[in-house]
Image (cartoon, grey):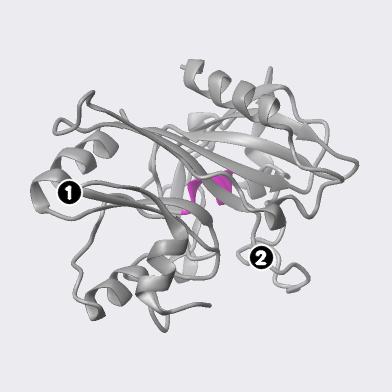
Amino acid sequence: MDTDWSQLRARCLVEEDAAILALHKPAGISVTGERHDTDLVELAAAAGETLYPVHRIDKVTSGLILFAKELPAHGELTRQFNKQTADKAYLAVVAATGLPDTGVFDLPLSVGRKNRVRIAAPRESIRHEGGRWFVDDADLLSAKNYPSITRFVTVLRGHAHTVLGLRPVTGRRHQIRVHLAWTGHPIVGDPLFDRSGAEPRTYLHSWRLGLTASWRTPPELTLTAEPDTDFWRPLDAPADPAALQRAADALRTLG
């Protein structure tokens, strides 16, 4: 992993103005605050640049990450995540077929042993009806649970894999990864659920982000980080741009 901040910054740059910096993060480097050798915030600080993460993506996740350069912008942008008005979209390659064109995982999360995120109900109580995965209130564990919703559209169907476009309505830790794995659609290469090490990476990608930035004219901040070619390795071929655009449009219309 390239840890020279100036080179990494230039290579991964998506968007920049006086208040924000958006990067296309490679899989395998942390944003900040995890148990690791280094992270983007630390690398920037060592080079004399202070960055404030607006949101988080896991170390194993590639793609779009947004930083603020100043605290007023950080506050304005993070409030949109807290109010669930940020328009977020991810791509994932899952080891499953037969998924519907659209669907929703409406599955509360809780924290189990060793601080591991899990569905807040026994796995066998998860129900699936009409493209919706859910659990009845009566099946919820006694531990504290957190309502969690992930909507999805199917982008590409392969022989043994499916590419999903995902919109995490809520933003819980590991939400997408747990929702997919616990419903039988694990993300290919996800070390939380596959420790074989057979895959070179986790096929989860932070794809698009839409926010309002009052200092910009117009104030819309629309960011995209298209996956690198290695993201499509489990598939016979990458999704064509038209299919990706249809998926992005469909995710925006989902309630």
Instruction: State the residue at coordinates (38%, 80%).
Output: 38
Task: Give the residue drawn at x 18%, y 55%.
Answer: 69
Q: Which residue is disc 2 drawn over?
A: 201
Instruction: Assign a secondary structure to mark 2.
Output: loop
In contact (CB < 8 Å): disc 2 and disc 1: no
Residue that protrudes farthest toward the right in the picture: 159
Q: Main secondary structure of the magenta part?
A: helix
- Magenta residues span 174-179
Q: Secondary structure at mark 1?
A: loop
Can you say whether 252 is above or below 238 in the image? above
Q: Label 2 is placed on what type of residue?
A: Arg
Placement of 247 over or under 158, stated as above or below: above
- The picture places residue 21, in percent across and down from the top left corner, at 29, 52
10 Å crowding of disc 2: few (<14), some (14-19), many (20+): some
Identify the residue position indicated by label 1 in the image: 18
Q: Position of residue 177 (x, y in %)?
A: 57, 51
Label total for image? 2
Q: Nearer the viewer, residue 12 or 236?
A: 12
Would you place residue 224 above or below residue 245 in this image?
Answer: below
> Which mark, residue 194?
none
10 Å crowding of disc 1: few (<14), some (14-19), many (20+) = few
Image point 82% across, 47% down: which residue?
235
Three-letter residue code for mark 1: Ala
Which numbered disc, 2 or 1, marks the residue closer to the eye? 1
Task: State whether residue 39 appears in this view.
Answer: no
Q: Is residue 135 magenta?
A: no
| Displayed quadrant of residue 151 | top right
